Image (tube, helix red, strand yellow):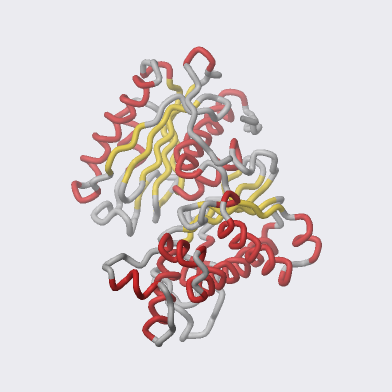
Amino acid sequence: MGYVRTFVPRSAAQSPLFVGVDLGGTNVKIGVVDDLGRPLSWVSIPTDAVAGPDVAVRRMAIAVGEAIAQAGLVPSDIVACGLGSPGTMDIPTGMLLDPPNLPGWQNYPLRDRLSDAIKLPVTFANDANSAAFGEFWVGSGRELDSMIMFTLGTGVGGGIILGDLSVDGHHSTGSELGHVILDHHADARMCPCGQPGHLEAYSSATAVVKRTRELLDGGRASSIIARLRRGEELTTLLLGEEADAGDPLADEVLMEAAGYLGVGITTVMHTIDPEGVLLGGAMTFGGEQTPLGRRFLERVRAEIRRRAFPVLAEKTKVAYAYLGGDAGFIGAAGLARLAHHKTVQGSGLKVQG
C-alpha cells in the first residue's frame, strides 16, 4: 500500500516539534512535524511567485501560523523551522541567487526574512535535498546509512545523504544529479540549463514528451495521435496510459528514459557507493503498485546490473521513494531537527519513525 498522510495527535506527539516548509514554483507545502518525523498538520498555499518574495514570505508566515494552530499548538511550542527551496542558492548565507522557477527573486535573503517573520531559527536547504532527507529519515531510506535519491518530474532533481550529512557542496550546488553527463558530444540532447548531454535531457518528463514528439513528427504510428487530435495534452500521464494499453511507441520512450536513468544512477553509485538508491517525483507511474511502475523500475535495475561493478549491482538497494509530495516538508523539518539536536545535544543521530 502506498503512502497516506496520517496526522499524529498532539497528545501522542514526541517533542521537540518543528515546522517544515517546502517552497515550490507553484505551491508551498507546510506542516508541523514531531521528533519522530510524524506530521501533526499540513497546509498548502499557492506560491504566487509573480507577486514577489516579500509578499510570499508574509503569506508563508501566515500559513506557518495556520499549520501550528491546526495542530492545536501555539507558536512557542515550535523550536525551529526547516525551509526547502528551489535553487540556485547560497546556503550558508541563506540567499536565493537566481532561481529559474521563481523569476524576480534574485539575490534575496529568503532564510532570514522568513526567520524574522515567524520568529524561529530557520534551516535552509535545496528542495530536492530536503525531500531526500525526508525519505532517509522516515521514508524508504529509513533503514539505510547512506543513499542517493533522484526526483523525476519536469526536471531531474537529486539528493545525497551520507550518515546524517546532506551533501549540499561547497558552493551550495551539491547533489545536482540531473546534470550528470551522459553524452559529451556537441550534438547531444540539450538540457534546459543550456548544456548538452545532461541526464535531465534524457530522463525528465520534459525530455520524455520532447522525445515522443520527435518520433511522432518523424512519422511513427501510435495510438497517442488520436488522443492528441482530440485536443488532449501530451504528458507523461498520457504516455503511461498508452504504454499500459500496449502502445509500442509510448512504451519505447518510457523504457528508453528508464535506461538512461540507469546509466546516470550507475555513475553516481560508482562515485558515492551508497547503501541505497531511491526514485521519487511525479514521473514514477504509480511505483510498485502498478505494472508500468514495476517495469520502469526493473528497466532501471537492468541497466545498473549491466553497467555497475558487480558488488554494487548486487548489494545496492534500488527502490521507489515512499513519502510522495510530503517528503519535502518532512525532510525540511528533519534538517531543522538535525541542526537543533546538534546544537542542543551535540548529536545528530538519526531517529527512526
Locate residue 45: give its quadrant: top left
Q: Residue at x 47, y 85 (%)?
A: 186
259 and 312: which is toward the camera: 259
Q: Position of residue 129 (x, y in %)?
A: 51, 48
Q: Residue at x 18, y 47 (%)?
A: 51
- For residue 250, say whether it is visible: yes
Q: Position of residue 301 (x, y in %)?
A: 67, 63
Name above or below for residue 166 compared with residue 248: above
Specify the quadrant that holds the C terminus.
top right
Locate residue 54: give its quadrant: top left
Specify the quadrant that holds the N terminus.
top right
Name above or below for residue 61 compared with residue 282: above
158 and 241: which is toward the camera: 241
How many numbered badges does the structure rendering display?
0
77 and 47: which is toward the camera: 47
Q: Residue furthest top?
A: 11
Q: Residue at x 29, y 53 (%)?
A: 102
339 and 330: which is toward the camera: 330
- For residue 98, say whether it is visible: no
Q: Residue furthest left?
A: 51
Q: Position of residue 280 (x, y in %)?
A: 53, 52
Q: Residue at x 60, y 37 (%)?
A: 137
Q: Position of residue 209 (x, y in %)?
A: 40, 70
Q: Is residue 290 left or right of residue 18?
A: right
Name above or below for residue 152 compared with residue 252: above
Name above or below for residue 85 compared with residue 31: below
